Image (cartoon, rainbow, N blue to C red):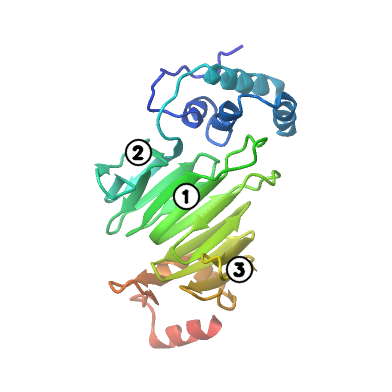
Amino acid sequence: MYKNVKPFTKNPARALTDLGANAFGYGFPYQKIAENRLANRHSLKNTLLSQRLPWKTLVQRLALSLMLLCTAIHGQSIVARINSLQGEVDILDLNGKNPQKARIGTPLFENQQLRTGTRSKALLSLADGTRLEVFEFSVINVVTLPSAADSIYISLVVRMLSGKIRLTTQISDFKDKKLLLKTPTLVAAARGTDFSCIATLKEARLAVHSGQVEVANRSPTLPQSVILSARQEVRVLEGREPDRLRFLPPEIIENYLEYYEITKAQEIRYRIRENDSFLDRILRKRSF
């Protein structure tokens, strides 16, 4: 019955989400099941059935969840795992200390942050199945979002201090399953979308490749939000509501992050590429 379940060795440093992922991949909320201690068995049953998975898979997943309830786990939750690397990528604590070189397969905990160097890149799989690409000169941290007591699904917050990222998340039918992005100036909420963001301490730009994203200023005194659809971009400055939305040409949105750079003064500016002629740059600005 359990022949397809990969065996694992008990390790106090590993979290329920990671142990569950060892058998079935990321996305299934073993940690939430454990935290709720199956207080609402009918809710769990309905949630499992709503996934429309084969009975054999459902039984295996439930059996693993019950088994993990009996396992003593300590430490922070694992929120992501590194799938690929390029260049210099480090993992540090939240105080920016105790750096260690990241490697493929390295887990990322809630109390850690990931930092990329010059011409560096990292591809991560988040605990909810989201694909996160982190580009050069970026600093990110991922944490779980507090959810309703009867919810067994994991909601995540990607916090980016500065840099460039691209997030691709799957469509979810569950209203209590969320993905948030926070930078020093903006907060964005997405469910089933693909978008890119470049941010500094005082400015952020976000563009949507597909789906929809709701964006607002991070400050609670500026509650107005905007909803972006495919090929739209917005800029959010410190202390200001989101700027007017702009439609981007297909050639810009396809390689959005390549068209911007962060200066030493922490400003986001348009990057002039070597093969761009003067006329090309003028036309591109007008097409915005």
Query: Crowdedness of circle 3 by 10 Å Cα count: few (<14), some, many (20+)?
Result: few
Query: Crowdedness of circle 2 by 10 Å Cα count: few (<14), some, many (20+)?
Result: few
Q: How far apart are the alpha carbons under marks 2 and 1?
A: 14 Å
Q: How far apart are the alpha carbons under marks 2 and 3?
A: 40 Å
Q: Earlier in the sequence, mark 2 or mark 1?
A: 2
Amino acid marked by disc 1: Leu
Identity of the residue furthest to the front in this view: 221
Amino acid marked by disc 2: Ile
The residue where tag 1 is placed is: 132
Q: Name the quadrant of the N terminus.
A: top right
Q: Residue at horizontal 42%, vertical 57%? A: 160
Q: How far apart are the alpha carbons under marks 1 and 3?
A: 27 Å
* Dot 2 and dot 3 residues touching (CB under 8 Å): no
Measured as percent of width and height from the top left, residue 142 is found at 45, 47
- The vertical placement of 94 against 288, above or below, is above
Q: Earlier in the sequence, mark 2 or mark 3?
A: 2
The residue where tag 3 is placed is: 223
Tag nearer the camera, 1 or 3: 3
Q: Earlier in the sequence, mark 1 or mark 3?
A: 1
- The vertical placement of 164 against 157, above or below, is below
- The vertical placement of 196 against 69, above or below, is below
Query: Crowdedness of circle 1 by 10 Å Cα count: few (<14), some, many (20+)?
Result: many
Answer with the quarter of the image where residue 270 lies: bottom left
* Dot 2 and dot 1 residues touching (CB under 8 Å): no
Measured as percent of width and height from the top left, residue 15 is found at 45, 29
Q: For numbered disc 3, what is the local secondary structure? A: loop
The circle on residue 104 is: 2
Q: Is residue 196 left or right of residue 28?
A: left
Amino acid marked by disc 3: Pro
Measured as percent of width and height from the top left, residue 16 is found at 49, 28
Residue toward you, 173 or 161: 161
